[in-house]
Amino acid sequence: KMTSPSPKLTLNNGLEVPQIGYGTWKAGPGVVAKAVETALRVGYRHIDCACDYGNEKEVGKGIKAAIDDGVCKREDIFVTSKLWNTFHHKEHVRPACEKTLSDLGLDYVDLYLIHFPISLKFVPFETRYPPEWIHDPTAEKPKMEVDPVPIAETWAAMEELVADGLAKSIGVSNFNCQLLADLCSYAKIKPAVNQVEVHPHLSQEFLVRFCNDLGVVVTAYSPLGSGSYVSLGMTKEQESVLLDESVKAIATKHGKTEAQVVLRWGVQRNYTLIPKSISEKRMKENIELFDFQLDGDDMETLDGLNKNRRYNDPGVFCELAFSQFYPIHG
């Protein structure tokens, strides 16, 4: 059965986004089409994708299966995708968006984001797609190759996508306060969203508050914290916020799971969240957050877990994995 629908937040262009979305990062081939279809069946109406995840064709199949079966209509679903780092030059933005649309089998995305404030040397589609981080994997010393492009140039091309109907809204991801302030100083179309890592170990209090002041909706990725990063060797299982005694106590108090408590904390901080799970049981759990309320003490306890622990940090992983030091949060 379908769970009760997620409430919506209103973007600065008047469009609405369901507060809980379904994340597709690291959802592998052979799994993701069915997972997306299942997510739509159980009540998700917001799907988060990206060129870089390498699975947009499958995501598209999942969306099509749900629509064909009468589960929902295209206009009921809020679909996000992201411009990859290699496509920041103005002439590459539209082709990249069109490639995403063709893979997803859609005429438009509801939201298109600049994935990172990192511009890398262009890689043609026919050479490799998605191009990922390393410029030439066959090189003697494969590495990430930076090719600086002003965000203003990329943003102007993003604005054209809105004018041309390819994207209803545009935004950014992994932007800090100062980059966002600078972008808002000249943007003709203000960014609707800033998608960043947020969880109780990285509460991003200043960034969340500043986005609110600017009228930019925050989307929290990795909202349950470290889970996705264990398999990447970037953290240990036992670091999970879900194992925290105080989180367990709040879960017991409300008769909810630890994950539901951590997600509810995000809901009450008034941003959108995109948890990912391929288990139908967990998918349902992750969206069933609207029949209970954390009280002031609960919120204070969860706020107190912050330790500025960032799992998705280019300043760390670009050097380790792609032989190029490139911090963006310094």
Image (spheres, rainbow, N blue to C red):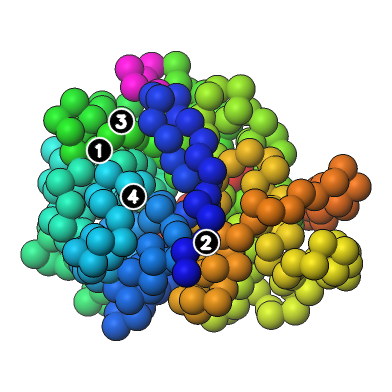
Answer with mark 4 or mark 2, whichever residue precedes in sequence. 2
Residue closest to the eye, 1 or 261: 1
- Label ID, residue 3: 2
Query: What crowding class fits label 2: few (fewer than 14 Cα within 10 Å), some (14-19), or many (20 or more)?
Result: few
Amino acid on which disc 1 is placed: Ala
Residue where numbered disc 4 is placed = 77
Amino acid type at mark 2? Thr
Residue at the disc numbered 3: 155
Kindly identify the residue that appears in the image at 25 percent across and 38 percent down. Answer: 167
**Residue 217 magenta:** no
Instruction: Point out the tag, 1 or 4, that comes first from the N-terminus.
Output: 4
Depth order, front residue of 77/102: 77
Identify the residue shown where x is 39% and y is 24%.
13
The mark closer to the camera, 2 or 1, is 2
What segment is highlighted magenta in the picture? 186-191
User: Which residue lies under the disc numbered 1?
Assistant: 167
Residue 268, position in %: x, y? Answer: 70, 43
Residue 128 tag number: none
SS at mark 4? Answer: loop
Number of the front mark, 1 or 4: 4
Instruction: Judge left or right: residue 9 versus residue 92.
Output: right
